[in-house]
Image (cartoon, rainbow, N blue to C red):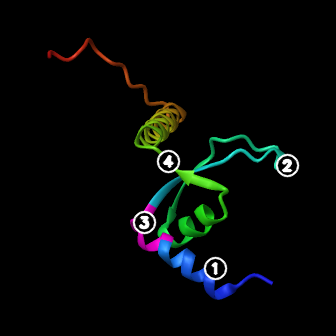
């Protein structure tokens, strides 16, 4: 039987080293057919449990920026599609002066 007191001490130690919100990247898990690359933003408590279980790792700044850029692009496309559905067209005119 695992030592629960030791488990929670280790979880709390990891949690104290983390900020309130953490970006995590899942690790490869062939048993479930999952490949590395799923990213999630979780609380420090949730992150501590996942890091302790070694199912995730901290995401790099580059991975976080890339994920945020993808989310922004997706949001832009959704917004444009909603406008098109309402019959509104946005037509870019030239480029802005530098």
The answer to which quarter of the image holds residue 11 is bottom right
Give the image location of residue 54, x and y in percent: 65, 58
Query: Circle 2 sits in a helix, a strand or a loop, which is it?
Result: helix
| Residue at the top extreme, as displayed | 94
Q: CA distance from mark 3 to mark 4?
A: 13 Å
Camera-side residue of 9 and 41: 9
Q: Which residues are magenta?
A: 14-21
Q: Is residue 66 above or below residue 6?
A: above
> Which residue has dot 3 on it?
18
The residue lying at 44 percent from left, 42 percent from top is: 68
Camera-side residue of 39 and 84: 39
Q: CA distance from mark 2 to mark 4?
A: 22 Å
> Which residue has dot 4 on it?
59
> Which residue has dot 1 on it?
7
Is 74 displayed left or right of 56 in the figure?
left
Q: Quadrant of the C terminus?
A: top left
> Which residue has dot 2 on it?
31
Q: Is residue 52 magenta?
A: no
The residue lying at 39 percent from left, 65 percent from top is: 19
The answer to whether the residues at label 4 and label 1 have Cβ atoms under 8 Å apart is: no
The answer to whether the residues at label 2 and label 4 have Cβ atoms under 8 Å apart is: no
The residue lying at 50 percent from left, 47 percent from top is: 59
Give the image location of residue 33, x and y in percent: 82, 43
């Amino acid at each position: 039987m695992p030592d629960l007191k030791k488990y929670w001490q280790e979880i709390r130690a990891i949690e104290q080293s983390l900020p309130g919100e953490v970006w995590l990247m899942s690790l490869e898990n062939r048993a479930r057919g999952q490949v590395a690359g799923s990213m999630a933003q979780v609380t420090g408590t949730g992150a501590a449990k996942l890091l302790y279980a070694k199912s995730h790792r901290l995401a790099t700044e580059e991975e976080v920026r890339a994920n945020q850029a993808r989310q922004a692009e997706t949001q832009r496309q959704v917004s444009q599609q909603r406008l098109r559905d309402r019959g509104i067209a946005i037509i870019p005119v030239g480029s802005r002066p530098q």
